Amino acid sequence: MSSPTTPTTPPARRPWRLVARREVVTRLTDKSFLIGTAITLVLLVGFLGWTAWSEGRSDTYTVAATADGLATAELLEEAVPGVDDGIEVEVLEVDSDDAGVAALEDEDADVLLRPADDGWTLVGDEEVDDDLALAVETVVRTTALTANAEAAGTSLEELQRGSTVDTELLEGDAERQDFAEAMGVLLAFLFYFAALGFGYTLSGSIVEEKANRIVEIITTKIPVRQLLIGKIAGNTLLALGQTALIVGVGLVGITFTDYSSFLGDVSAGVGWFAAFFLVGFTFIACWWAVAGALASRAEDLQTTATPLSFLIMAVFFGAFLFEGVVQTIASYVPPFSIVLMPIRVLNGDAAAWEPVVALLLLGAAMAATVVLAERLYRRALLQTQGRVTLKQAWTAAD
Amino acid sequence: MIETRGLVRRFGEHVAVDDVSFDVPGGLLTGFVGGNGAGKTTTMRMIMGLLALSAGEVRWQGRPITAADRRRFGYMPEERGLYPKQKILDQLVYLGELSGLTASAARDSAAASLERFGLTDRAGDRVEKLSLGNQQRVQIIAALLNQPQALILDEPFSGLDPAAVDSMVDLLREETARGVPVLFSSHQLDLVERLCDRIVVLRAGRVVVEGTVEELRARGPERLRLVTDGDAGWVRDVAGLDVVAVDGPEALVQVTAPDEGGADAVRRVLLTEGLARGEVRELAVVRAPLSEIYREVTA
């Protein structure tokens, strides 16, 4: 029997890179993906542009005051823009409290300034703007401090200098905290967006390979593990790339707004988010791969991927709902730690060692998942008769 | 040569493949025949390493087969395995690279094969835009990209028109001329009969027949066709045969005791008797078609 005259072909070197490259190229040449990314960026730039624009303009509030409050109201008119450059105050003199209330109801005035036992009350019709209240409080306090200080025999200049520095810090802290919180919500949303979007794509492409049986051709050429690694690596790269693009454009956009001075404070949190995202997405992607392998047709995916979708949703909502001790504990528990720990870093709640420990835990969970997922993926991958349960995949022979 | 030795595959309680042993010699086309659920696809998947063996062994060139050996096999799964939305040439290059070819070698090989099948101008099309027959051509190109040392093809002819069948046959003949063993499964017995050097028949997970087409036929009953110029009804009285059919001057008979050299005796009797009654226009051995043998061995 003659032996075939076949030239020997060496095996593909690190074939997972070929698989990963295909995943990336396929997605980058997919019009809907490109359009979706472009729309996201346009919305982001639009939002930041609107923020920068709305910061530049100031809101004018009409403060109604009776004769008792007139002096204070006029003080507000003069001093509030110096405290918050987004707010201007106009004074409306009214004859009585009742007339002031009527002015509120007729929307002739936004707030009514009324003397109280130990200071002043701002009366609004439906609401009193937070920024206005804060600015008024600052001005009134400064004035009160001045008067009190004079009574105590201290000089006005000295006191004003001291109080000015004090109030600016108070204001800055609150705003900084708001900014950090908003950043945390945004990052949690980005992870949710990527974990769900890229996850579905990953499991969809695995089902596609199963349904078309091309997986049979591929796995006669390369080990199943290489295929799994390649698919996860490719999709992680895509998710990370898209998220980095969005975050990058967002951060550059923020430098055009008044928030630019806060960027230094959130950089540590954003850096940790990148690290948690990388490990966390890989962790989640393993399960998406299993969800794909358990399905035989695209329709099955709805069933096999549902628990995973709920888990990712829980991680997302956990970012807002968990507080206090629960938040601290959850910030160590994968997959919740993926967003909660960076959020705690952003909020300045986490000690320097905490994200390191949480990341190590997440990394360990990811490593365990890769091993589990590879077994499930390998065994479910070639079962093309309908849905495979986790138990069947786990116990099946190769 | 590929050898399977005592292959067994169980799915839970069900034994899909039960002690299957056969050879696929180099340079020959081996047809793999059997009804639905006979275990053909399962056996082929086991040869390709896609399914683990419950028992038994697959051997290549006289030693246990390895993953490296299989990587240089060409394989065509039962349902066509390609990415529907990827461009044809890109897809072939990808599969070639996975087989270990460089990108440029894969591109050259794919381009040459596409040209051969007249598909050069479709290279940039998505697979889903091709007709079924052309998809199958791309499929076989994929299996042949890296000059495989063996071919395992699950139903390569299903859905092909006669012209496509012919070009597929030419291609397979070229591969066997290189000394490559080719195993292909098919439901089309006439095709298998026409093409194959060897046949393996599977029934309910077991090999019922293995051998060359001639060997298989020899297993079948010997039949004789007699054409006289008168009525041939007299054959009913001849001993040592069963009458299959008599129609006027024509008769088809089956020798009942072929093992005792009875065929020659029956032939002599028919000739003598026939000549005694008039002319014998024809007396010939009739080979039962493969489909009939198949029905018999798988019954």
Image: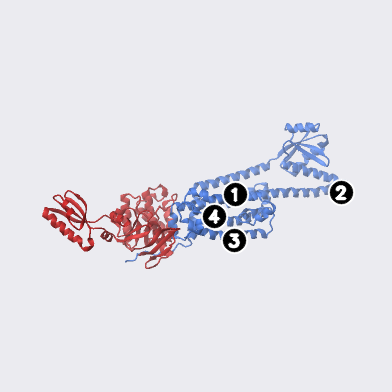
Chain colours: A blue, B red
Q: Quarter holding the N terminus of chain A?
A: bottom left
Q: Going from the N terminus, do you reach mark 3 or mark 1 first?
A: 1
Question: In the picture provided, is B129 more to the left or to the right than A86?
Answer: left
Return the residue at label 2: A154
Q: Distance between the residues labelled 3 and 1?
A: 22 Å
Q: Going from the N terminus, do you reach mark 3 or mark 4 first?
A: 4
Q: Going from the N terminus, do you reach mark 2 or mark 1 first?
A: 2
Query: Callout 2 environment at 10 Å: few (<14), some (14 to 19), or many (20+)?
Result: few
Query: Callout 4 environment at 10 Å: few (<14), some (14 to 19), or many (20+)?
Result: many
Report whether residue B263 is seen.
yes
Residue sitting at x 41%, y 50%: B127
Q: What residue type is labelled 4?
A: Trp
Question: In the picture provided, is A262 more to the left or to the right than A396?
Answer: right
Q: What x and y, as percent, mark residue A380?
A: 48, 56
Q: Which of A114 and A248 is in front in this view?
A: A114
Q: Distance between the residues labelled 4 and 1?
A: 15 Å
Return the residue at label 3: A364
Q: Which of B62 and A67 is in front in this view?
A: B62
- Disc 1 element: helix
Q: Distance between the residues labelled 2 and 1?
A: 58 Å
Q: Going from the N terminus, do you reach mark 4 or mark 1 first?
A: 4
Tell me the subunit letter for badge 1: A
